[in-house]
Amino acid sequence: MFPFFGFIAVFLLWPTVLVIAGAFQTSSGQLTLENITKVVGTSAYLQAFWGSIRLSAVTALAGGVFGALLAWAVAEGDQNGVFRRQVVAMSGVLAQFGGVMLAFAFLATFGYAGVITLGLERVAGVDPLTSGAWIYSFTGLAVVYTFFQIPLMVLIFLPAVDGLQVQWREASDNLGGGSWAYWRHVAGPILAPSFVAGLLLLFVSAFSAYATAAALISQGSPIVPLQIRTFLQSEVVLGQANMGKALAFGMVVVVAVVMSLYAWLQRRGAKWRA
Amino acid sequence: MRWIVLTVVGAYLLVPLLSMLDFSTRGVGSSRTLEAWKAIASYPELLSAITVTLELAVLTVVGMLCLLVPTMVWVHLRLPGVRRTMEFFCLLPLTIPAIVLVVGLAPVFSWLSYFFGDTPLVLAFVFVVLVLPYAYRAVDAGLRAVDIETLSEAALGLGASWWGTLFRIVIPSIRGALLSAAVLSIALVMGEYTIASLLNYNTLQVVLYQVGLRNAAVSVAVSLAALIFGFVLLFIVSSAGSRRRGAAREESTLAPLEGGLQ
């Protein structure tokens, strides 16, 4: 009991409190709102937050749609089949496959000497130096992030698809509804809360992600985690010691808002099921 | 329709993995070579980083088991009212981004290295926190799957001590769940980059990145090897689980709420 909560307090709660408290303190420890107003008033920071939110939203949507489709395709097959087990196990690994290794995988595919880039050069005569640069840009980040979002959505969404009863489909068929009517009026509304809840989790997962972006982008900081990196790695300018904490606090606020939306949605979903 | 989805999404997920294989075995012209794979051994910093990371994985698993299992069993049996609180704190690391945590960890680590010296193994303290959500869910599923209450009451009624009950009754009956928790923790520690790199410790991922700046093919080879290692580990767990209880239940213990490493 006490060792457990003591450990949590020292290694999880205490650092978090330090971040939040630091966001409201000057470097000498006085209470101030200056860090926060500086974050809100500096266009580079606002752009980083906007970039983070945009990246998370785009990849959550893309990963959510493709992941949901894959979950559906898997659920259509044999419940205890080898294929389904393999997809689930693979999703478990690939959803965790972020960071440096994922960045390398995509550089090996789309980078300057990547397989697809060189293939395109051979087939279509595209110059690899112009066609290989996009992987280091915002679009590149979005494509790479979507890679871990898809298997994550499969893991989150598959139980919901499994929950669809065969009898509902039969009832819809017997009442003369076609495939479209079934998805529009039966399966769609039932799956909608789980789908949106999944999107919110994917948003948080992309928003919190650091390692993949850090390995891919070494110059410039288009998203908040990379802005925080510059504060942690460089000699901090005098009087700005707590700016990194203010940025981190901003991330906590965004995640907290999205997670409360998620909790609210879960409660609504539970009420509807009961 | 089903096959279109499987092909398109499958290609998106598999092409980068196959590209890694191609990239790391690319020779001059269109020949194949294992140069990059052999070169792994010529990077001593890579080998020592692998050792350090495996040591960290072991420490994290031991720390996680010692911290989590007795507490969870105790709460499960004696303090059901605390269960919600415990779940909340165990899942909390999922909602605090690692990049945020690392900002606040600097003072904690300055006194950790004061006590333990300048060793990367102190990272295990934070890694235990990072693996808590995954380990908690695996162990929780294990505890729910067997009737721990009856078993432990029988043991205590026959005169076993609390620790005797824990080690001789409870732990053997949830060993599958403990294995899942351990494997998920190992996978997480092997892939952790954020905290290790920003606190300047040379773990596998950190060194992998540095080596990649000089020789990309070697890093791609190591990444692929690490990925295959992860696959094998998770397959062992999922097949061990499905042999005993059927595949459906094991999915829930393998399914994380969200990714941890990105």
Image (cartoon, helix red, strand yellow):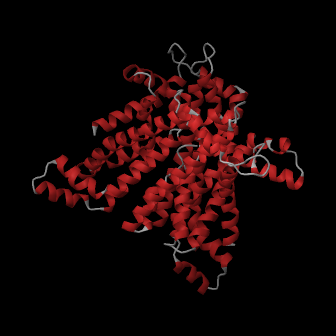
Furthest-right residue in this view? A125
In the image, A113 versus A15, the foreground residue is A113
Q: Residue at x 48, y 47 (%)?
A: B187
- In percent of width and height, residue B8 lies at 70, 63
Is residue A50 positioned above or below A20 on the image?
Answer: below
The answer to whether B144 appears left or right of A181 in the picture is left
Q: Can residue A142 be seen at all in this image of the molecule?
A: no
Q: Can residue A135 be seen at all in this image of the molecule?
A: yes
Q: Residue at x 56, y 70 (%)?
A: A75
- In percent of width and height, residue A113 lies at 77, 44
Is residue A68 positioned above or below A243 on the image?
Answer: below
Q: Residue at x 73, y 44 (%)?
A: A140
Is residue B64 positioned above or below A273 on the image?
Answer: above
Which quadrant holds the C terminus of chain B? top right
Which quadrant holds the N terminus of chain B? bottom right
In the image, B63 versus B1, the foreground residue is B63
